Amino acid sequence: MIQGAALILLCQLAGEAVAHGTGLPLPGPVLGMILLLLLLLLNDTLPRPADTGFLAPAADGLLTNLSLLFIPAGVGVVGRLDVIQAYGLGLAVALVASTIIGLVATALTFAAVARLLRQEAEA
Amino acid sequence: MSGASDALGDFGLWVYLSRTPLLWLTVTLMAYVVADRISAAIGRHPLANTVLIAVALAAGMLAATGTPYRTYFEGAQFVHFLIGPATVALALPLYRNRHTVWRAILPMGAALLVGALAAMISALLIARAFGIPAPVLAALAPKSVTAGVAMGIAEGMGGDPALAAVLVLITGAIGAVTVTPLMNALGLRDMRARGFAAGLAAHGLGTARAFHVNHVAGTFAGIALALNALVTAILAPIVLRALL
């Protein structure tokens, strides 16, 4: 658990350092994710790969409770709903409609290209 | 005399507790536990989103006790901090499903471009039609991207980063609530496509929802979240300039 948490934080730290050092438009945690993925893939190419099972408790623990992590930011938004009210209906319509359009366009494009390539759907 | 000081003593205890991180951290976790029970009790209906219920409970507590958000956040920050490590942890499901992911590289690339542009352009056109001013449009353009990135993008284009964060979270809530009924209505059963759409249009909240539904969906949502952060950072300034 702690070993996994340490590796995750190390990757995030490296990601933050790169993001701030280079001014890349990607946030540190996303760079950290890419770094951790590369480490896992590289490990597989070693003649004797290290056992990475220690990552699972920390990583799965965070991901199964991902919803919890958005509560503090969500509570903050409740206090700032006045900024939305100022632009009223227009902003509300734009948010709802564009989110639905984005969801539908993404899913249909994915499914259409997968069908063109005759890929099986995975449940 | 002693009664008065007892009353003051009780009040003093409240003043003390309400200023420590412990109280509001506990409230945040309790709100999540209760919200999760409520969501389970109504059969995980997509409208009964755990985050929304928990936010309503915690915000209600703040309003009822007259507690400022700053005080609340001193406790809640320990939970908020974990968004970063959780983002890094997305690498693990990505690695476990690497063969599935690699096979879907072409559908993902196409869906990424079409979806990112569709979400951004439709939002900007509708808002512009309602006469919403340019600085607000700059905060609206990156709304489908994870909050930290969206704030940076908005600021770079002359928008208010705080407003961008609010719009991002509302978008996430709309996406998390609508994605399941929407995909069912379309008859789409491919969990890769459903998850990818949730992560692209509704970032972390969509990804959290996708992990509740299915592991493959969650994995593809995580990939979409990361890729869209990159694509929108590049495309938002170009699209905004073209539309203004």
Image (cartoon, coloured by chain):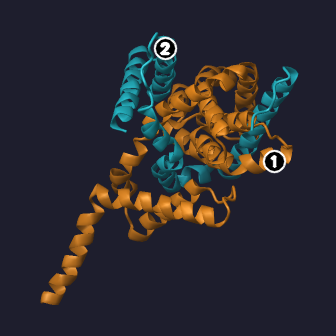
Chain colours: A cyan, B orange
Residue A115 percent coordinates (x, y): 86, 26
Asked which quadrant contains residue B95, the reply is: top right
Tell me if residue A21 comes above or below residue A100 in the rendering. above
Tell me if residue A64 comes above or below residue A32 in the rendering. below
What residue type is disc 2 on?
A: Leu
Work out which quarter of the rendered image holds the N terminus of chain A and state it.
Answer: top left
Work out which quarter of the rendered image holds the C terminus of chain A and state it.
Answer: top right
Between the C-alphas of marks 2 and 1, the distance is 39 Å
Q: Is mark 2 on a helix, strand or loop?
A: helix
- Give the number of callouts: 2
Q: Disc number at residue B152?
A: none
Pointer 1 indicates a residue of which chain? B
| Front disc: 2 or 1 | 2
Asked which quadrant contains residue B242, the reply is: top right
Taking the image as drawn, is residue B58 in sight?
A: yes
Query: Label 2 belongs to which residue?
Result: A42
- Residue under the point 81% across and 24% down: A119
Asked which quadrant contains residue B64, the reply is: bottom left
Residues at marks 2 and 1, common chain? no
- Residue under the point 50% across and 36% down: B161
Q: Is mark 1 on a helix, strand or loop?
A: helix
Taking the image as drawn, is residue B141 in sight?
A: no
Q: How crowded is mark 1: few (under 14 residues within 10 Å), some or many (20 or more)?
A: few
- Residue under the point 45% across and 51% down: A72
Query: Label 1 belongs to which residue?
Result: B184
Residue B234 percent coordinates (x, y): 61, 19
